[in-house]
Amino acid sequence: MTERVLITGGTAGIGAACAERCRSDGYEPVIIDRIGDGIRADLSDPAETADALERALEGGPITRLVNNVGMVAPASVTEQTLDDFDKVVALNLRSAMQCAQALIPGMRATGFGRIVNMASRAALGKELRTAYSATKAGLIGMAKTWALELGEYGITANAVGPGPIRTELFDRANPPGAPRTQTIIEAIPVRRVGEPQDVAHAVSYLLDARSGFVTGQVLYVCCGMTVGSAGA
């Protein structure tokens, strides 16, 4: 029987690349998203999320989870609205916990599990990202805590922290050709924005059964931007 992987927000961008990589790795992706051919749900809504997870688990336990879905809502701290802040927390952070809570019992019963939270380099700090950076840092914190709590059951929990990756989400927040976008590119050692497949490759490693001695870690896929700047 083909092993399944639950991927939230797996219709486009990094999520779609992860789904495609999972297929090539021999897994069956189960996608929950607002659009596409998978299970449709607004993951910012707890009731819709619960219903979607129930449908996902109708076929039995799912022992691999990629908490990928997310939104940005860029704004300075003085301009960040509480409404947008709450929306970002609900989608980026609360849905990840809800998905983990739904899948962990099956993982524990199986004696195996892999959880990957899609964090971001922005968790280390980034202008105009108060809500986004807070939730991405939260995903890292949850992964580290879950690693401690679930290790004895054969379950690992890690986070991947992408840097600038060419997706619709990135382009909306960083319009191509804008001075701020060019500044980002010039600070990347290889002078290019990453591709979704770069992140999917890292996720694939952490989902692998052979990665059982790696847990509670953050794997930054940022071409060295967490190390420093390549600019003058």
Image (cartoon, helix red, strand yellow):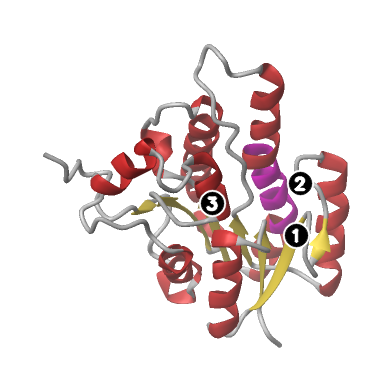
Mark 1 vs mark 2: which is more N-terminal? 1
Residue in the image at 52% along x and 35% along y: 138
**Distance Cα–Cα, label 3 vs label 2:** 15 Å
Amino acid at the residue labelled 1: Ile
Q: Which residues are magenta?
A: 93-103
Instruction: Single out the mark in the foreground, 1 or 3.
Output: 1
Spot occupied by residue 63 in the image (x, y as percentages of width and height): 64, 67
Mark 1 vs mark 3: which is more N-terminal? 1
Q: Is residue 226 left or right of residue 109?
A: left
Which residue, given by chain and number where applicable, does mark 1 sit on? 32
Residue in the image at 70% along x and 35% along y: 90
Task: Work out whether residue 124 can be spotted.
Answer: yes
Which residue, given by chain and number where applicable, does mark 2 sit on? 43
Q: Nearer the viewer, residue 127 or 44?
A: 127
Q: Residue furthest top?
A: 78
Q: Mark number for residue 117?
A: 3
Spot occupied by residue 130 in the image (x, y as percentages of width and height): 50, 25
Q: Is residue 232 left or right of residue 212?
A: left
